[in-house]
Structures are given as structure tokens and as C-alpha cells.
Image (tube, rainbow, N blue to C red):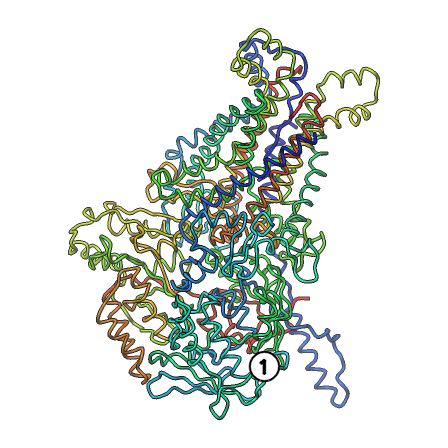
Amino acid sequence: MATFLARRLLWFIPVLFVVALITFVLMKAAPGGPWDRDAESKQVDPRTMELLARKYGLDKPAWRQFIGYLVGDFDDEGQFVCGAVCGNLGPSYRQRGKTVQQILFEPPPEKGFFDSKFGHTARLAVLALVIALAVGIPAGVFSALKQNSWLDYALTFITNIGIAVPSFVVAFFSILIFAVGLKWMPVVQKSWAGLTPFIIPAIVFGFGTMAQTARLMRSTMLDVMRQDYVRTARAKGLGEQAVIWKHMLRNALIPIITTLGPAVAGLLTGSIVIENIFGVPGVGRDFIQSIGNRDYSMIMGTTLFYVILILLGNLSVDLLYGVVDPRIRVD
Amino acid sequence: MAQATPSLSRSATAAAPAIASQSQRQLAWRRLRRNRAALIGGIVVTIYLLTALFASSLAPHNPIKDYGASKAFLPPFWQPESPAGKTYDPTFPLGTDQQGRDVLSRILYGTRTSIVAGVLPVTIVVLIGTTLGFVSGYLGGGADNLLMRITDIFYAVPTELLLILVMVTLGDTALGKAANGVPLFLIALSAVSWSGLARLMRGSALSLKNLAFVEAAQSLGASDFHIISRHILPNSVGVLVVWIAFAIPRFIIAEAILGYIGLGLRPSLNPNDFFITSWGRLFLDAYSIIGSQPGFLLAVTAVVSLLVISFTFLGDGLRDALDPRMKK
Amino acid sequence: MSRKTFFTMSGIVAAASMLLAACAQPVAPAQPQVIKETVEVVKEVEKVVEKTVVVEATPVPAEKPKVLRINLGTYPDVIDPQKSSFVNEIAHLKLIYEGLTRLNEKLETVPGAAEKWEYNADATELTFTLRKGLKYSDGTPLNAKRFEYSIIRNINPATAGEYASITNEIAGAPEWQGAEKDEDKAKFEEQVRQSVQALDSSGQPCKDYEQEDCLTLKLKLSKPAPYFHTVMSLWVTYPAKQENIEEGGENWWNSSKFHIGNGPFILKSLEPFVKGVFVPNPNYWGDIPKVSIEYQYITDSNVAFQAYKNDEFDIVGLAAEDYQAVMADPELSKQATIYPGSCTLALQFRNFKEPFNDPKVRAAFSYAIDRERWVKDVLQGLGSPALTWIPPGFPGYKEGETRFAYDPEMAKKMIAESSYGSVENLPTIVLTFGDTPRNRVRYEWLGARFKEVFGDALKLELKPVEPTAFTAKQKDRESDLQMFIGGWCADYPDPQNWLSVYFEGSTTFADRIGFKDEEFDKLIAQADVELDPAKRAELYQKAQDRLVDANPVAFFWHNVNAYMVKPWVKGIVTTSQDADWPGSTVPATIDIDTAMLPQ
């Protein structure tokens, strides 16, 4: 297991490299640069663009920019500045004076890590996952136990809303219902301290995951319910409750556990729409804007960070697959 | 975007060998017919497909014809007056948008693009994903490792990033300009999505390959191809079908959300274009005028939800029908 | 209950609940009537009881803080006077700081930190005299050397400010920025330092930032520029403190601690992407504002509008899509605040590309635009048709221009008279635009109208391009653009900023569309250096007339600014330059009637 883990972690490096390369190539190939603004604004004049390009090293050949970003390069004074491998994700082209790692992880003065941009996204994502599981798992179980009953159909219907309706629609309607209608929260939050402001956004955000969890739980429960060992347990005279808890649930939960990793990774990297609508000051909003802005460092840095999250999520699936199902030997 | 991952098909763990295909198909069909929800789902999906094909005959108006500001923001039939102060006009059963274009006609035409947006990438993804996944899972070893790392790379690149950059960079090429930009979008979408299914199918192959009947087939000298196609594939169908039933609506919705961010199909001036508009586009348009004509958003949501639910019922029914161990 | 019935019913229930939610209106408080009654009661009491201390007929509410809550939209990338360039960034800066001059409600340039200014005989030297006793918000003195620092910092190529070139009239500025060799850099830096000098009353250079007798700022310009005092009102000159910038480093602007300014407000706190709070600055020399200001940064306009309706914002932007609904509502329609903007949009042609190298083809398309209908149908009335470049409200605006107004017959006639002879002979024309949801709708409309005028024989294609890529295409002369909509928003209210900066033959803009007209350039060259205001205005007028004649672009529409403002916000005075929120140019006039605030 240890060698397996080590080897998989080692594989991160080439994967990161290839992703960085693809991103870099596509990013540079895309027409337009960091100082091409929205067509109706005044444009930066050519000489200033030259000065800025030089300041950010855009006048160097592409391969050197790429290696420089990943490993490091010498600055104007001949000092070596370490690159991504040291955790330096580069200076932002738009938010002048800040590095990408500052933008992502540095909280405002006198505040903790969870007040940084990524901290907000993390709070949102984790809360969304917790709610999704807390609602999805029981929903799936009941759905399976009462298969084809009205409860099953009702739950199916509700979970389908989570998948069929785009998140910005669900988000907006939830604002109408909870903020305007019920007045449980303001439409626009004044502060994002603690967990309370995140509750409604997390419910909306987790809706899709909740739906998928419920469906998955339902189908694995149904599978498990049909197993021979369940019949055996019943035949042995075990009470229905015991049968449910001891045998069915535990086995049905296994596939769910394997989805946790990718689910968290997906939530952490997919929060753009929710952040935009609810005004959460997280990473997602910035990321999409940075693509349009051609903020090269921001794009590369955030992508690399996202990739690491996703790879870790994937790795957890493989690890758990091997652990929970002894018939699968992953090596 | 969180991807649905698999349920390991535990039904395959029993020692029952695969039954001859002929009677299995008959059994499956019979079981499907008995599942009323699935049948309804199937009928609804078919209706949508026909609508997509015959939109031009069904739509009461030209979807790109705007009737001007006087006919803008008309409410749908269940609302006598829209918030913009306009009253219902029976020639526009679902009302109009801000340009005075008929919502019903636009939805009908949008079905085309969205069905294609659901089906085409899924087909590509299934072909690539199952092939790579089975091969990877069954063969194991070095081939598995390499294929999985390639999968990792595609899985890891953030979807929006790749899509935006691909659309921006290739948008001016011949491929990008073809058919309102739809094929490029769908190919790009497939490229970022196949890895999830590949992992799923790999998992299935992994859990199946160590089973008795596979060993039996191997000892009889069956080729890898034979084993994969005759034993692994049929026993993975349940999982695959469930995945497809969720993937199609997921792609349809993805088109909507990516539109919100800023990617879209090219607008059309020619009513004879095939892909005039899409549900994703309509979601956006409807969302932007929600204060003046909320019925628009409601209509689009209802139409899309109905299709998704139908797919789900159909998918469930297929899964139940195809499960070789189903006793009921 | 069968599955089908259940399904149908739940569908209806879900639909109904969504519908109800969509139609949900916040309960309108019936306050105004209550307040009226209260006032009347107090009056009666005062009449009857003469000598007694005022009896409280109603409990006196606690003094409500007056906070103007505004949704600004996107959060700024950088809030540094010498590096900022976007409207939202300037919206922060102009509250905290003030320039040597400023604009008043009529968009006239009036004294700001400087109490007077003087040009020399040929407008190549501009001397400002600062007010005595100016202070920063922390009480420390502000003298001319501060402005010397900030103006030079703007020009300094090391700063690489994105709007640096706006002060390029200062002698040595463009040369310093363009210098490659070290000795050139040093030489031109020295020249700039000679061109921007803070002097004491005896004409000697000031010593430091504490020197009280340092009230003169002398600027040397490379050519006569009688409009330069207006340029000095812009944010690039704002006197941020050198020691704060150095202490805070590259990132100094992100903290309210380092933003010590001389403007009407103090930046009390800044929570990035969440909230910015500004309170009145008691050390400001002019009218102290009566309200505090709070900015928030919601980018989804539907959400912002809901928050407004829920009384969480006092000012939000009004989107064109919501305009009709607002006007249909008796309460909301009174809160719509619409005033002319500072931008003109034009349908631009690449004059060096077929078929637009033929002036008749350009004229044809100008005649083919139904501007009135565009404003009515597409902009929902939020805009005005444009037949000139300078918009209404700006000095140099010409009223009553009629050339190239909508005339489909003339449009067809122009094509017939052109070198192509007929619509069939025209090559395919591609109308390119930045791909946003709003634009798609607009360009579909426009394309449909052109087809109506010219017939189906017109080969017209719509081409949406990712917005940044679109900008890049505009800048690249070799790109495939033929026809596209582009515009200009004024930096400062002077015809020079419209005509010379945009259309003079050597400018980048003119180069990109391929416009070079000798007569126009001559008029502009004369006007730019003309000192007599009347003559100057006349020359610019002639230049604009010449521009309309030459028709390198088809002027299309002038924008308006549209906002929703709560009824308890009083005293807003709007100007066309208020692109961020209404009243932002003269915020001291704004007041809030706390009696009208909802409980």
C-alpha cells in the first residue's frame, strides 16, 4: 500500500506538468492579452503595454516563460526567483501587486485562513457536501426501501429538480423564497463570518450532489437488498431494523464513500455560478474572470491548484476502492 | 463539475454465468414493458425527439422573427398580465421575450440543439470511455497505469478553462464556424468529459475480471476481445445505462451554465439554419428578463425538467430490465 | 393515487410554487402615510402649548446613521491612483482623494485642491496655486510637493500605470516612457522633473512635504494645451502619500490604513469583494458630505435588483431588461433615475477594407440604421439616437444634426451609386461583436434590420467573438474585422478628448479604422492650441462637421445612465460623467431623510 501510494503521488508530477503545458499553450494561443480591455473602455496605450509586458516577462520567449513559471527564473537584478514548485504561483496581471497565492490563500489583515478566498470556497463546498450527504443518504435509503411508492416518486422528482434545472435558476429562486419571501436571510450578505451566511448557498450548491447521492444510494440499496446474504439474514430471524442497519446500509454505503473524494474536489472547483449569484467572495468568481482577462498567472496558478485537488480526490477513490472491496486489487 | 461515479454492480458478483443473449434481450424487453414509469419516460423522450425533427412544422411562429417592442414581454397563458404591464395575447401561448419573439417557437427549435448537445457528446464519450476503461481495467499493469494517467490529465483540467480556451482559440477555424459553432462546442465538451466514464468502466472491468466465469472463459482460450465484449460489457451495461441516463441531461444543462459564463452558439439570421437557438441560450435570455416576464423561465425550466425526469425513469427502467439477476 | 396522477399533480404544485416565488413582491410598507400623520400631530401640539418644553407626541426614534448603500458591481482590480483605470476603481479613488481641479455639477472645471491656475501667454506653462492650510484626513498638511510626487509617479515608466499617457502633454513625459537606453532614461527623467515643479513663494523648489510655504505647482507642456487644467482633475494626479505607498509595498492599496487622502471621504474599511465603507472627512476644505457611503460588489443584476426591492440597497443599476417592468409599477417608476451618459457608440467600418473603402457604401449603411427604433426596441428607451460624435450635455455638442439619419431609400440609392452598383455585388459583410448574452440579442436585431432594408440579397454574417479576443481584433489592423460597433466614453468634458484623441490622423484609433482626413487634422491642430474659448469652440465645431461629412463611422446612439434610487435619498445632482452612480461627481449635496427609512 505504501509503495502504491508513493508511486501514485509521484505520478502527480508528470500529470501536473502536462496539464500546465496544455493550459499554457492554449492560454497563449488565445487571441488577446491582459491589457486588452472591454471594447468600450479606454485602451492602454502601446508604450505602456510594452513596459508592462517587460515588467511581467512577456517579452521573453515562450519556453522560457513556461519553465520560469514552473521552476523559476532570474529577475532584472539577476536574482533567482523560484516558481511554482516553491509555491510561488506568479504575480497577478490584473490585481497589481498581489501574487496568485496571496489572492487565493491570504486572508485580510487580522483574520484567519478561512477568511481568505479559498477559505470561503472551502467553507461553502464542505458545508454543501455535508448537507448533500445528510439529506441524500436517508432520501436514497427510504426511496429504496419503499420502492415505487409515492414517497419514492416524490423524492425522485425532487432530486431531478436538482439535476434538471441549472444552478443559477435554483439559486435565484431560493433567494426569492428565503430572502424575499420568508425573510430568513438578506438577499445580499453583509458579512461572511462563521457558517450561517453559507447555509442557503450551500444547500443550493449541494443540490446536485444531493440528487446524485440519493440516486446512487437508492440504486446501491436496491442492489444490496436483492443479495443472497440479506435473505439469509432475514431467514436467520434477524429483525428488519437489524437487517437494514447491519447489513444493507453498510454495504450500500461503500460506493458512496468512494465518491466522496471526487465530490469534494468537484465542489471546490465548481463554485463559480453560486459564488456569482450569492456574492460569495471565493475563488470561482475570480477564476472565470481571469480567463477573460487573460491574467496568465492567475489562470496557471488556479489551474494547478485545482488539478492538485482533483488528483487528490481521484487518488482517494482508488485507495478506497482497494480497501473496501477485497476482490479488487489495485497495484 | 461533480461527476456521478459508479455503483459497483454487485449483481455480477454471484456466480451466475451470462445467459445466452437472445433470450436475455427478450426478458429485458418484457421487464421494461411492465415498468409503466419507464414506458412513459420513453414515450416522452420520443415525443421530444420528434419535436426536434419537426420543429419547423410545429412552431407557430418564426423563432427569430421579432415583433417589436409593442409585443415584447407578453405573458404566458397562465398569467393575464406580465410585470411589464402587458396583457396576454393568444397568438403567443407562452408569451414573448424582450425582442417580441415567440417563446414557444424558440423552445421548440431549441429542442434540436439541446437533444444533439445531449446525445452527441454522450455517444463520443461512451465510445472512447468504455473502450479505454475496459482495456485499462481488464489488461491491468503498465497499460492500465498509462491510460489512467492520461485519464487523470483530462479529468484534471478544469472544464470551463478548457472549453473557453478551446472555443476562443479554434473559434475562427473552419470547424469553429460550422453549423453555428455547435460541433466545436460538443467536441470540446466530450473531450473534457470522457475520463469520468473511463474510470467508471475500468472499475467495472476490475471487479468483473476476477470472477469465476471470466476465469473459465480464459481457461477455454477465449481472446481478450471476446471476453470484454461477451462477458464484461454485458455485465457493465447496467452501470453504463444509468450513467448515460444522467449524462444526457447533464450535458444539456452544461450547455446552459456555460452560456451563463459566456460561451454560446452563434446566433443565426437564417431561419433555415438547423441550430437556431438552444435551451441553454433560452435559459439565459429568460433569466435576464425574469423581472419582466417570469413565465419564460418557468416554461423553459418545465420543458427541460420534464425531459430529464423522463430520461431518469427510462434509465431506471432499462437498468432494472437489463439486470440479469432481477428476480421480480 | 396512480403514478401518473401524482406526477401531474406534483408538477403543477412545483410549477405553481415557482410561479408564486417568481411573482413574489415584497410587502410595500405603508410608511409614508404614517409619517405624514406624525408630522401633523407635532404641529398641532406646538400650536396649542406655547411655553412648555416640546412634548413628545411620538417617541423620538434614535438618530439613524445616514448611510448611502450602493451596489457598485465588480470589485476593483487595483485601487491606486496612478495605476487604476476602470470606472469602479475610480469610484473608490474619487471619494478618498481630490485633484488640483475638479468638476462641478455643470461639468465645468472648478478649483479643487488648487484655488487658482494660470496659463502663460501661449499655454505651454500652467501654474497652480494651492489653497492655504490644506490637510489630509489624518490632519497632516498637504502641500504642492505632494502633487509633484504623484504626477511624476504617474509618468514614471517604472510605475507602468495603465492610464499614464493621459498626461503626455507634459514636456519629456512620452520620451521618458519610450526611452530604452539608460542615459536616455536619465535625461528624460530629469526633463520631466524640470517640467513638474513644486515651488515656494520665492520660486525656489520646495524642500519637503512638511513645508508650509509650498503652494505653487508649475507644469511645462510640450505644446500649447489650454485644456490641461481639466486633465488635472483626473484621478491619475491624486496625491496618495509617498510614505504610505512605500511602507505598504506593491500591495499598499488593499488596506484602508494606507489610503490617507484629501477628498471628501475617508476610507474607513475595505473588505475585498464584500464591502467598502466611506465616512465624511472632517478635514476636507470644501463642503463636508452629510452621509456615509457603503459599496457592495454584486455582479448579478437580477440579485442586486431583488436586494434593492428588499430595501438592502439605496442605489442600484437599472438593466434595460427591467426597464419596462419598473415603468409599469407606480412606486418603482418614480425611483428610476435616468440621465445622459458620457459615451457615444458608432457602427465602425474598416475604411481600408472592401467594401467600406467606398464612401457610398459607408453612407448606405449609415442611412440604413433605424436609430429611433433601436433605442425603443433594443435599448428599451434607455439611450438616444446619435448623429454626431460628441453627446448632449458635453461642450461641443451640436444639436439638430440631420445628416445620415434613417432613410432606407437613400440607403439603397447609395449602393446603386457606389462602385458595386447593386446589393448582389457586395461582398459578404461580417458584423463582429463581443459575445455576451445582451450583445447576441442586439446584433441579431441589427442584422435582421439590415436585411429588411437591403433585401435578402445582402450577404450579411454575424460573428460573435469572445470579448477579449474581440478587443484584440480591434487593435490589430490585420485582423478580419470589417464592420463592428465601437464607442468612446469621455475621460474629461472637453471636445479635445472626443475629436483629437479619437479621430486625429496619427492616433491609434484613427489608424485602426483607416481614417485620415487632411482638412479634419488641420482644424484639430488649430483648435487644440487655440487659447480663445470662442474661437476654439468654433474650430472644434467645424472639425466635427467635417467628421460627419467624411463618415468614417456611422454614429449610432448615445448611452444613458439608468439607476434606481430610493425615495429617501435626497439632493442627488447628476452629471453625464457619473458613470459609477448618480451624484458621484458632487457627493456633498446628497442627504438621507431618515424619517422615511423603513423600520
The structure residue drawn at horizontal position 19% and vertical position 46%, both measured from the top left corner, is: C424
Residue pointed to by mark 1: C284
In the image shown, does C293 or B137 lie closer to the viewer?
B137
Q: Report x, y in % for residue C141.
A: 59, 83
- Judging from the image, mark 1 belongs to the subunit labelled C
The structure residue drawn at horizontal position 48% and vertical position 79%, both measured from the top left corner, is: C102
Is residue A140 depicted above or below A73 in this figure? above
Q: Report x, y in % for residue C536.
A: 30, 80
Q: Report x, y in % for residue B91.
A: 41, 43
In the image shown, does B211 or C39 lie closer to the viewer?
B211
The structure residue drawn at horizontal position 71% and vertical position 85%, both measured from the top left corner, is: C46
Quadrant location of the N terminus of chain C in the rendered image: top right
Quadrant location of the C terminus of chain C in the rendered image: bottom right
Q: Residue furthest top?
A: B220
Given the image, on which type of amino acid does mark 1 rest?
A: Tyr
- Residue A98 appears in the rendering: yes
Numbered disc 1: secondary structure: loop
State the image quarter where residue A218 is shown: top right
Q: Residue furthest bottom?
A: C202
Q: Report x, y in % for residue C43.
A: 68, 82
For mark 1, does the 10 Å Cα neighbourhood hold few (<14), some (14 to 19), or many (20 or more) residues?
many
Q: Is residue B79 left or right of residue A158?
A: left
- Residue B241 appears in the rendering: no
